[in-house]
Amino acid sequence: MEKKQSFLKHFTIIGGGTVINMLLGLLTEPIITRLVDPTDNGKYSIFNMYSSIAVMVLCIGLDQALVRYYYEKDTDDYKRSLLSKCVLIPIICCLAVSGIVMFLSLSGIVKFKFDPLIMGILCIFTLFQLIYRFSLLLVRLEYKSKLYSLLNIIHKLMYLGAVFPLIFLFKHDHVMALVISTTIASFVCLFTSVTANKKLWRLSKKGEDSCQTTKKELMRYGYPYILSMGLATLFSAIDKISLDIYRTDSEVGVYTSAMTLVNVFAIIQTTFNTLWQPMSVEHYTKDPEDKTFYQKGNQLITIVMFFIGLSLILFKDIFVYLLGSKYREAAMILPFLCFNPIMYTISETTVNGLVFKKKSMMQIVVSAGACATNIIGNIILVPRLGCKGAAISTGISYIVFFTLRTVLSNRYFYVDFKLGRFYILTFAAVLFSFYNTFFKFGILTVVGYVACVALLVVLYFDSVKWGLSYLSKGIKKILHKE
């Protein structure tokens, strides 16, 4: 394993790669949205959604078991053996399900949304994504920050390198161009990540210090995640499914374009989530009584995520202008979609108790509660408000998701996260989002933004002060070196 550097150094490395990835997206996404009709973009979004749901279910929770048991021993034999026990069963399940799906599609017994050719590509893509999920977990668990950043950049470059020529090649079938491009990018990243960790992927090689944890024990820990992760993925996809049922593929495309704008959060969200889980598990393994680590992490990420979210809502009309006239409605959808990355990322710092105490069954309660909220919200709001209704329902559901994760986690591993001030800030952000969902930019938007940021500073003054002091010292060090 590479020498474990400081959290902030890993954060900077992965964050730098994410910035490059985001800039590539900002430069090319407006071109793609002008070439691809919202209807085709919506179908492509549903293709990715189906694959995501399949991967989460077919992993049968063994990806989470890999994370939980990875640091029990620090030898290659142990890690190789653990990986073998975790990855082989999901691969077999994926191949079996793919065979059934293709039989049903080719025979016409079941009428799928896509034709048999795209269904075949979907099965291949899902297999690549499933193996890549485990491979990427190894990259994270080994703290290979540079490789993780490189993989994200490679995926974007390969996708862009394939999508533009294929769009012109498949002039009348842009969906085909998009799904082939993402499948190519997925395979290249899979091959690169497996090659980089090839010593751990030699699954047939076993040593004296192999993993003694039985498959039964791994399955016992992981099987609740089959339902919880499946529900969590369904929860995140309910909005698109509802729009697909009640509205049109075009609205799904517009909705998806708004979600791509929320990816500005990716700089922080992806970087933080990539590092936090393995580091928090390792910290608990070494010092289970120290809770200051989790409190500080929670306060700092709360400040950063809310500040970025509020700022994105303030400038939403400028960002949406880049997408083109067909996607203008995305501006009114964006405010509540911001609660997805905000609540999910912050909840990563409050859910530790369920992970540390191996209470994976409680994850089902979390996912079921949030999923039920989102289903009810979409049934009520989507027929009446369309994309806006889907966004509002999703935003509220993620607040419920955060609450359930935090409350249940604190039953097993209590940490004082000062939740009172957190919900005061959340309530203010909800009001700000409601206004900007139904009214265009104006003086009240600016006033609301200033009020929310001021409230953020007041509620988290000590943490804001520490953060600014830390940044100031870092800048002085850089200037001093120069």
Image (spheres, helix red, strand yellow):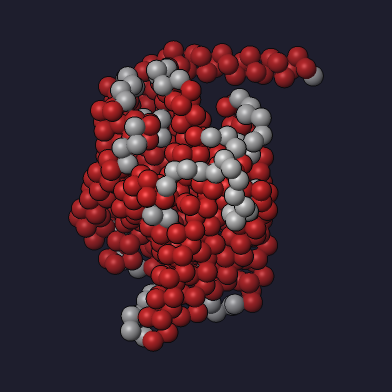
Q: Nearer the viewer, residue 385 or 23?
A: 23
409 with respect to 308 (left or right): left
Q: Residue at x 68, y 62 (%)?
A: 161
Residue 85, image x, y percentages: 48, 52
Figure quadrant of the N terminus: top right
Residue 38, image x, y percentages: 46, 65
Residue 424, image x, y percentages: 29, 25
Outermost residue on the front side: it is 208
On screen, residue 448 above or below 371: above
How many numbered badges does the structure rendering display? Answer: 0
450 with respect to 196 (left or right): left
User: In this view of the protein, can residue 383 be seen by the observer?
Assistant: yes
Outermost residue on the bottom side: it is 107
Q: Residue at x 54, y 17 (%)?
A: 468
User: In this view of the protein, can residue 232 be seen by the observer?
Assistant: no
Residue 186, image x, y percentages: 58, 60
Q: Nearer the viewer, residue 132 or 65?
A: 65
Q: Residue at x 44, y 39 (%)?
A: 68
Q: Residue at x 47, y 69 (%)?
A: 95
Figure quadrant of the C terminus: top right
